Image (cartoon, rainbow, N blue to C red):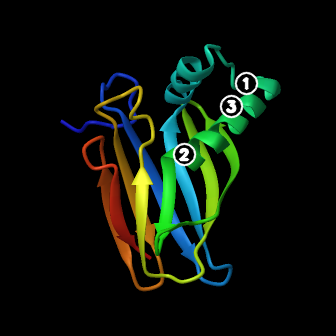
C-alpha cells in the first residue's frame, strides 16, 4: 500500500523544502511545501483569527505573518552568523502552499540549518530539506528532537 504524505486523510505532519544554490547570484533559492491547513492553524493559534486565503487581504496578512515566522523558525547560519533571508511570496495550489524565499550564501560550504516549522502546533512534525548545489546534493530530516543540523552547499 502506497501512502501519500500530502493526503488529507493522513495524520502525518510534514513539510518539504527544496533548496537550490544559484552560484551566479550567490543565493539559496528555497521553496517550502506545506499544507494550507497548517498555515491557517498556525495563524489562528498565534493571532486568534481565521483566514481565507482566497481573499487578497487575508493572503497578504498570511504572507506578512509567514515572513516573520520563517525568520524565526527556518534559520541558516554560517560561521556563527545568521544569513540574510528574504521571504518572496506564497503560492496556493489547492490544499498546498508553496513558500518561496531566498538566502544570501556568499561562500558555499557547511551551514547550520535550524528548521522548527510547525513544531509548536504539531510535536510529531517532520521537516524534510533537500539541497542541490553544483557538486553536492543531500536530504536532511528535522523533527522536534533534532531541529538543527549541518547541511552542505
Residue found at the very far front of the displayed protein: 80
Please identify the quadrant where the N terminus is shown. Answer: top left
Q: What residue sits right under mark 2 in the picture? A: 72
* Element on which disc 2 rests: helix
Along the horizontal axis of the image, is 33 left or right of 129? right
Real-space Cα distance between discs 1 and 3? Answer: 11 Å
State if disc 3 and disc 1 touch (CB < 8 Å): no
* Element on which disc 1 rests: loop
In front of the other: 143 or 17: 143
Residue 134 drawn at (x, y percent): 47, 84
* Element on which disc 3 rests: helix
Residue 74 drawn at (x, y percent): 50, 51
Please identify the quadrant where the C terminus is shown. Answer: bottom left
Q: What residue sits right under mark 1 in the picture? A: 54
Tell us which disc is closer to us: 1 or 3: 3
Vertical arrangement, residue 69 with respect to residue 41, above or below: below
Along the horizontal axis of the image, is 94 left or right of 7? right
- The earlier-in-sequence mark between 1 and 2 is 1
Real-space Cα distance between discs 1 and 2? Answer: 26 Å
Q: Residue 62 carries which label?
A: 3
Q: Please tell me in which quadrant of the rendered image residue 109 appears.
A: bottom left
State if disc 2 and disc 3 touch (CB < 8 Å): no
Tell us which disc is closer to us: 1 or 2: 2
Q: Residues within 10 Å of mark 2 (few under 14, many from 20)?
A: few
Amino acid at each position: 500500500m502506497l501512502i501519500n504524505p500530502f493526503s488529507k486523510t493522513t495524520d502525518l505532519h510534514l513539510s518539504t523544502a527544496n533548496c537550490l544554490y544559484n552560484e551566479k547570484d550567490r543565493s539559496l533559492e528555497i521553496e517550502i511545501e506545506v499544507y494550507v491547513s497548517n498555515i491557517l492553524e498556525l495563524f489562528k493559534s498565534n493571532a486568534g483569527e481565521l483566514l481565507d486565503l482566497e481573499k487578497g487581504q487575508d493572503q497578504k496578512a498570511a504572507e506578512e505573518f509567514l515572513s516573520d515566522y520563517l525568520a524565526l523558525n527556518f534559520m541558516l547560519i554560517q560561521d556563527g552568523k545568521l544569513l540574510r533571508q528574504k521571504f518572496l511570496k506564497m503560492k496556493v495550489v489547492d490544499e498546498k502552499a508553496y513558500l518561496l524565499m531566498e538566502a544570501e550564501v556568499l561562500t558555499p560550504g557547511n551551514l547550520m540549518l535550524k528548521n522548527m516549522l510547525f513544531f509548536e502546533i504539531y510535536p510529531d512534525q517532520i521537516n524534510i530539506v533537500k539541497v542541490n548545489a553544483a557538486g553536492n546534493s543531500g536530504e536532511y530530516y528535522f523533527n522536534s528532537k533534532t531541529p538543527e543540523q549541518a547541511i552542505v552547499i
